[in-house]
Amino acid sequence: MKPIDVWSHPCFTAVCYTYDELDAVLLREAVIPDEVQLQVYALHSKQIMKLTTTICVLVVAAMLFPAPGFTADDVSEAERSVLLKNYPQLSDGTITKSPIPGLYQAMLDGQIRYISADGRYLIEGDIYDTTNQRNLTESYREVARQASIDRIGDSGMIVFSPEEVKHTVTVFTDIDCGYCRKLHREISAYNNLGIEVRYMFFPRSGPDTLSWFKAEKVWCADDRNLALTQAKGGANINSENCGPTPVAQHYALGHEIGIRGTPAIITLGGGLIPGYVPAKELLKQLEQ
C-alpha cells in the first residue's frame, strides 16, 4: 500500500492514503493509533476544500513538546500576514504558535485548527503529549470555553446558587429536553452539595421554534428562576415581550465552543461534561 502524498516535518510526517487503500485492520491493530489520525485540508482558490478521497495519518515523534503558554504576541507580523492572506476569516488575535514548531494554532469556525507556516495545509484534530498523557488541544479548548463564558457573566444567565458556593458550573439547557428537565428537577440536590448552576439557553431546534420562544418567555418573566422551573415542568409562561434577550447569544456561543447536545455542563475551568450527571457524581468529578 503506497501513500499518495507525504508531508514531512522535523517533528512528524503526515502520510496520505486513499480510503480504498487504507486497511481498517491496520487501525484496529493500533499500528497507527486512532488519536493521531487527522484530516488534512488543502487550500484552493482561497476556499477550504476537504480532501474527501484521502485520509492522512499523523505519525508523531516519540515525545511531543510540552504545552507552553503561547500568545498572539509570539507570532511575528510576517508570519501572521501569511496566514491571514490565506485565511482572511481568521481573527488576528486567535493566531498563536502551537506546541509543534512550524505549525500555528488558530480558531476557525469556532474550532481549534492547525495551519502550516506557508498556509497550504490546515489540520483538524488533537495534539497529544504522549509523555505526560495529556491532550494539549483540549487544554486550549478549556481556556477558550471559559473565556467565552466569562464574557457573558452572571447577569446574562439564570443562576441557581447555594448559600455557600463550593463549585460553579454553567449548563447549556433546552427547556424541552428530557434530561435537562431531569437535571433541573434535582436542582436542590446540586445546590445542597454547594454546586452553583448557571443556565444558558441552547434550544436544539434552533431559532424561531417553540423551544426558542419558550426560552425568550422565561427570560422576560419577572422571576426568571421560577419561570424556568415552571417551564421545565411543562407550564406555559405568559410574560410580556421585554425586547432583546440573550437567547441568540447563548445559542451562538454554544455552537462556537462545540456544544452539540443538551444538557452540556461546563466546569469553571472550561471542561466539558456532556449530558446529565447526578449531583453526587458531578461533585465527585468536580473535586477530582
Image (spheres, helix red, strand yellow):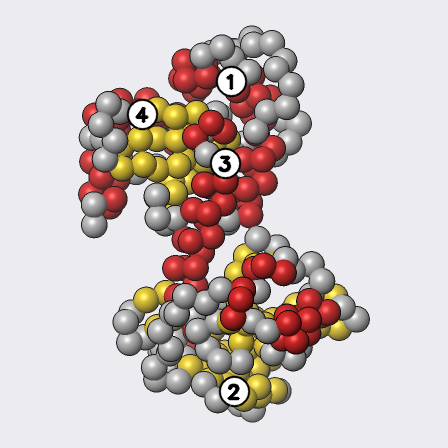
Label 2 sits on residue: 9
Badge 2: how crowded within 10 Å, few (<14), some, or many (20+)?
some
> At label 2, which amino acid type do we have?
His
Q: Quadrant of residue 48?
A: bottom right
Q: CB of mark 4 within 8 Å of CB of mark 1?
A: no
N-term mark: 2 or 4: 2
Label 4 sits on residue: 161
Query: In this view of the protein, which residue sits in the foreground, 38 or 165?
Result: 165
N-term mark: 1 or 2: 2
Q: Give the side of residue 163 with respect to residue 261, left or right.
A: left
Q: What is the distance, in whole Å, between disc 2 and disc 4 at their CAs?
A: 51 Å
For residue 24, the mark is none
Q: Is residue 251 visible?
A: yes
Q: What x and y, as percent, mark residue 263?
A: 42, 36
Location of residue 95 with respect to 208 vertically, above or below: below
Q: Give the side of residue 87 with respect to residue 143, left or right.
A: right
Label 1 sits on residue: 218
Q: Secondary structure at mark 3?
A: helix
Q: What x and y, as percent, mark residue 276?
A: 34, 37
Label 3 sits on residue: 152
Name which residue lies at 50% across and 40% down: 151
> At label 1, which amino acid type do we have?
Val
Q: What is the distance, in whole Å, between disc 4 and disc 1 at their CAs?
A: 18 Å
Name which residue lies at 39% across and 70% down: 68
N-term mark: 2 or 3: 2
Q: Nearer the viewer, mark 2 or mark 4?
A: 4
Q: What x and y, as percent, mark residue 26?
A: 42, 80
